[in-house]
Amino acid sequence: MKRIAVYPASLDPIHNGHIDIAIRASKIFDELILAIYSTPKKNVMFSLEERVELAQICFQGYNNIKVAHYTGLTVSYARSVGAMALVRGLRVFGDFEFEFRMGMANKKLAPDIETVAILADEKFMYISSSTVREIAELGGDVSQMVSAHVNEALKRRFASYEPK
């Protein structure tokens, strides 16, 4: 039986912490689907198509990491692709509380799907998509937080932005 896991995220933008968790998870499962949520509640900077493309570039050469997008309940999507687990990354204590509650809710909805939490590497613990966006918007250097192509996409996005 093929062990498939889904790593759900909004990836706005994808950063080195996401990449690290995905690569590490791909060593545990036969296939990892990096599933980008189509319509998150938060406002997104990059379109769904842009987020998918940026993620696909990150994982070229990783044969068991697939990038997809979905709508609806995460556990419903996970079932539709035959996943046995959801992968979540944990950076700080606040993440644990949120992910614990979400994991318990998902367990009620889909008792057959496990939640697997992977601790962030300490060099990525401070990185979040919102931090990356804010620094990039204000003209700061995010090249140590994101892949080169994501850095370029951020520079293009904010090229005409003038801080108030």
Image (spheres, grey):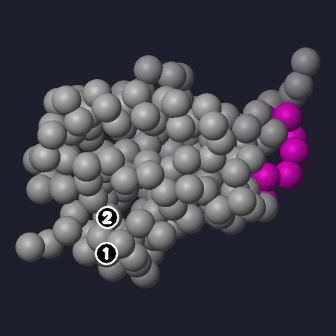
User: Against 161, is 60 above or below?
Assistant: below
Q: Quadrant of the N terminus?
A: bottom left
The residue type indicated by label 2 comes to Leu
Question: At numbered mark 2, what does the secondary structure look like: helix, strand or loop?
Answer: strand
Residue 138 in magenta stretch: yes
- Residue at the spot of label 2: 32
Answer yes or no: do the residues labelled 1 and 2 have beta carbons within 8 Å? yes
Callout 1: 10 Å neighbours few (<14), some, many (20+)?
Answer: some
Report the label total.
2
User: Against 107, is 117 above or below?
Assistant: below
What residue do we see at 73% from left, 38% from top? 131
User: Against 8, is 23 above or below?
Assistant: below
**x, y percent for residue 34:** 37, 55
- Residue at the spot of label 1: 64
Residue interval drawn in magenta:
137-143
Instruction: Name the residue nearer the viewer: 67 or 49.
Output: 67
The residue type indicated by label 1 comes to Asn
Q: Quadrant of the C terminus?
A: top right
Disc 1 to disc 2, C-alpha distance: 6 Å
Residue 140 in magenta stretch: yes
**x, y percent for residue 153:** 64, 51
